[in-house]
Image (spheres, rainbow, N blue to C red):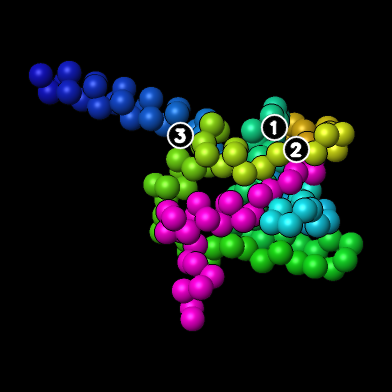
Amino acid sequence: MKRLLLLLIMVVTSVIGVMAKGEKLPEYDITGAGSGSEGTLLVKVYVYAKKVTDSDLKRAAVHGVVFRGCSGNQSGARQPAMAPATAEADNAAFCNAFFASDGQCQNFASVVDGSYDRVKTKKGYKCGAILQVDKTSLRKELEKAGVVRSLSSGF
């Protein structure tokens, strides 16, 4: 009985480990790419991986806008991060589900047509694109989940 229980625990933990590995956010860089229409932000995202999909680009763009911010574009405007540095760790359960490969973050970004870049590197590819992030709707969703404080909460 103990062996069966031990075997079951080992199988479950290995399956969870494999599933978690597929959900990991790839390494990426993000910079500003100009200003979009009102309530949106244009960002240039480069993802480093062996195989890059639009889903990876969208996840990286939304994650970058929320937790990293992005450096300035040609006008010099810098977009600060929406959430404080500790917000991702404090809200780990929400963030893991939100930034999953088929998570809700996919709804807040779209790839601008004709903006793809692809460069072969030693470890795989550096794929990039310009994405439009709907930061107004994204902020509302994150405020509702408690990841980001409301802009009016300080007054």
- Which residue is tagged 2? 111
Label 2 sits on what residue type? Answer: Val
Residue shown at 87% from the left, 34% from the top: 114
- Which residue is tagged 3? 20
Extreme residue toward the front, this view: 38
The image shows residue 102, relative to residue 140, as above or below, that is: above
Q: Secondary structure at mark 1?
A: helix
Q: How many other residues sit within 10 Å of disc 1, few (<14), some (14-19) or many (≥20)?
A: some
* Snapshot quadrant of residue 56: top right
Extreme residue toward the left, this view: 1
The image shows residue 106, relative to residue 28, as above or below, that is: above
Residue shown at 71% from the left, 39% from the top: 110
Q: Is residue 138 magenta?
A: yes
Do callouts 1 and 2 mark residues in contact (Cβ within 8 Å)?
yes
Do callouts 2 and 3 mark residues in contact (Cβ within 8 Å)?
no
- What's the magenta region? 128-155
- Which residue is tagged 1? 54
